[in-house]
Amino acid sequence: MVRYSKPKQTQIVYQFVCEDSKSSQNYIKGFSSYFCLGLETMSSNGTSAKNVVKTAKVKAKFFHDNFIPYKMYCIFDKDDDDISVIKNAIKDCEDKNFKYGYSNPCYEYWLLLHYKRSNKVFTSAKECGTECVKAYNTEKSKEYTLSQLKAEKNIFNIQDFKMALRNAASFSFDDISNTYTNMHILLESILKEKKIEGYEDEAQ
C-alpha cells in the first residue's frame, strides 16, 4: 500500500498573538493591509503576558505538527502584571525564538506616540489610555471615548505610523519597568524582512 505524505506548506505564516481582541489586532490588521504583508492575528486565551506566550506555544506546536513554517509574534503590555511576569514572558519568547512587542504601562502608549512625543511616567494604564484618547481626539478632531478608540478598525494611518517611529526612536527605552515600547522595532523589522522600502518618503 502506497502512503502519500502530506505536502509541506512553503509560505511562512506570520502569526500575531494579542492580549486583546480589538485594539492591537485592529492595528496589526491595518498595518498588514496597508503594506500587503498577510499577517495573521488571534487573541490569547486569557489576558496577561503569561497567557499570551502560553497561547503562542500552543499555536506554534500546531504549526510544527502540521509542517507549517511560521514566525510567532507575542503582543502584550505591563498593565496589572508584576514586572517579574513580564520578564518571564520575555525570556520564554526568547527561548522559543518568538518575537515580542511589549508596552508599558499599556498598549495605548504605542498609540500615543502616533500623536504625541512623550515618555511620561504614568501612574496607571488608565492614565495612559486617557492621555492617548485625548491626543487622538485633538489630532483627528474627534470626540472618542477610550472604548471607541480601542474599537476603531481604521486606526492605522501611514503618516501617524511614521510619527510614532520618529517619536519612539527619540527615546532610549532601556528599562522595561518604566514607560516603554519596542513596537517600532518589531514592526520595522518585519518591513525590512519583507523588503518594504520607500515608506519613509511616502509619509513626509
Image (cartoon, grey):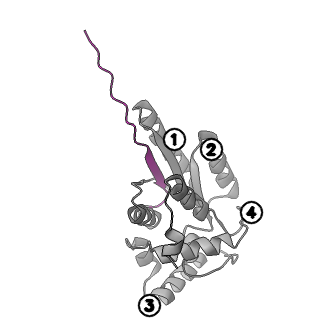
Secondary structure of the residue carrying tag 3 is: loop
What kind of secondary structure does the magenta stretch mostly adopt?
A: loop
- Asked where in the image residue 127 lies, by quadrant, the reply is bottom right
Q: Label 2 is placed on what type of residue? A: Asp
- Asked where in the image residue 78 lies, by quadrant, the reply is bottom right
Q: Check disc 3 and report the residue beneath it.
A: 141
Of callouts 4 and 2, the N-terminal one: 2
Nearer to us in this view, 169 or 64: 169
Secondary structure of the residue carrying tag 1 is: helix
Dot label at residue 174 = 4
Q: Check disc 1 and report the residue beneath it.
A: 57
Nearer to us in this view, 99 or 24: 99
Of callouts 1 and 2, the N-terminal one: 1
Secondary structure of the residue carrying tag 4 is: loop
Assess whether residue 161 is covered by the magenta stretch.
no
Q: Nearer the viewer, mark 4 or mark 1?
A: 4
Seen in the picture, residue 61 relative to 124 is either above or below; the reply is: above
Q: Position of residue 89 (x, y in %)?
A: 62, 49
Of callouts 4 and 1, the N-terminal one: 1
Q: Label 4 is placed on what type of residue? A: Asp
Seen in the picture, residue 34 relative to 47 is either above or below; the reply is: below
Q: Quadrant of the N terminus?
A: top left
Res 122 seen here: yes
Q: Check disc 2 and report the residue beneath it.
A: 92
Residue bounds of the magenta highlight: 1-20
**For the residue carrying disc 3, how many other residues have a C-alpha within 10 Å: few (<14), some (14-19), or many (20+)?**
few
Q: Position of residue 159 (x, y in %)?
A: 49, 77
